[in-house]
Image: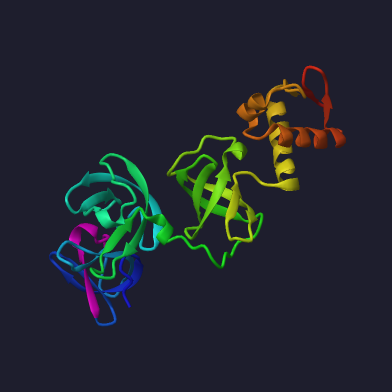
Amino acid sequence: MINVGAYNELEVVKQLDFGIYLKDGDTEILMPTKWVPQDTKIGDRLNVFVFRDSDDRLIATTIEPYATANTFAFLEAKQVNQVGAFMDWGMDKDLLVPFREQSQRLEPGRSYVVFVYVDEETNRLTASTKLNRYIENTNIELRDGDIVDLLIYSETDLGFNAIINNRYSGLIYKNEIYEAIRVGDQIKGYVKHVREDNKIDLSLQKSGFELVDDVKWRILNMMKQNEGFLALTDNSSPEEIKAKFQISKKAFKKAVGALYRERLVKITDKGIELLK
């Protein structure tokens, strides 16, 4: 069975002047010559992306689009007309976001997080900015401390909302962000807590002992690069510490305390010295 909007491994069954035909079961799919890899021959199996062209024909390509069916992506709106907005997704034919699928009117030249899916009526790939329709909020298969892939999709007064592992949604609180992030960023993060109401708190840092251990080595590495000295003290401002390590002052003090107990550093009024 052909999966439209996804990658399929298909067998080459015909070679013609204008391209090749690949087959799965009884279905033959054209790949135009411009996309056919060199030295391709009948009997080869190719991993190809399958989509429908403007004539509603199934087409195979070796081009890798920016998004496939059932995934979230950050795409730029190239043009808007009476049908909807057309997004650049790395293919010759742009991806449509119909007006009915827009949570706000999209503007040319701006980028938006969208969900890509196969429309049941047309069987064509389509996109939507009404993300809540496609985010799972039950049967959360995550645990506190899990490392996850995040796609930042909106900013609120509390912080930034992120798509988690292309399935769920979670929140990174502003007062726990120590690095610059913005909508569209794809980053690694950590599950801080899965709440009883299935809402998910996220963090961009490890927690507990893992965080302390990570910060310890970052402090040691910076000291080694600065002749064994770091000009930060108990009186240093949270902003100074954030600028150097992208962490809270509390996390910094815990890491320095651990280094002191391990007799790796000496704490003075001017800063921290590396013990030899």
Q: Quadrant of the N terminus?
A: bottom left
Left or right position of 236 against 154: right
Identify which residue is drawn at 81% across, 18% down. Answer: 269
Give above or below for 12 relative to 237.
Answer: below
> Which residue, as the protein is rendered here, is positioned at the far left?
17
Identify which residue is drawn at 50% across, 47% down. Answer: 161
For the image, the number of numbered tags is: 0
Q: Quadrant of the C terminus?
A: top right
Quarter where residue 246 is shown: top right
Residue 57 in the magenta stretch? The answer is no
Left or right position of 249 against 12: right
Give above or below for 149 relative to 53.
Answer: above
**Segment colored magenta:** 27-39
Left or right position of 244 against 149: right
Q: Is residue 98 visible?
A: no
Tell me residue 178's x, y (percent): 59, 35
- Give the colouring mode of the picture: rainbow
> Which residue, as the protein is rendered here, is positioned at the far bottom?
26
Which residue is nearer to you in this view: 146 or 274?
146
Tell me residue 133's x, y (percent): 41, 61
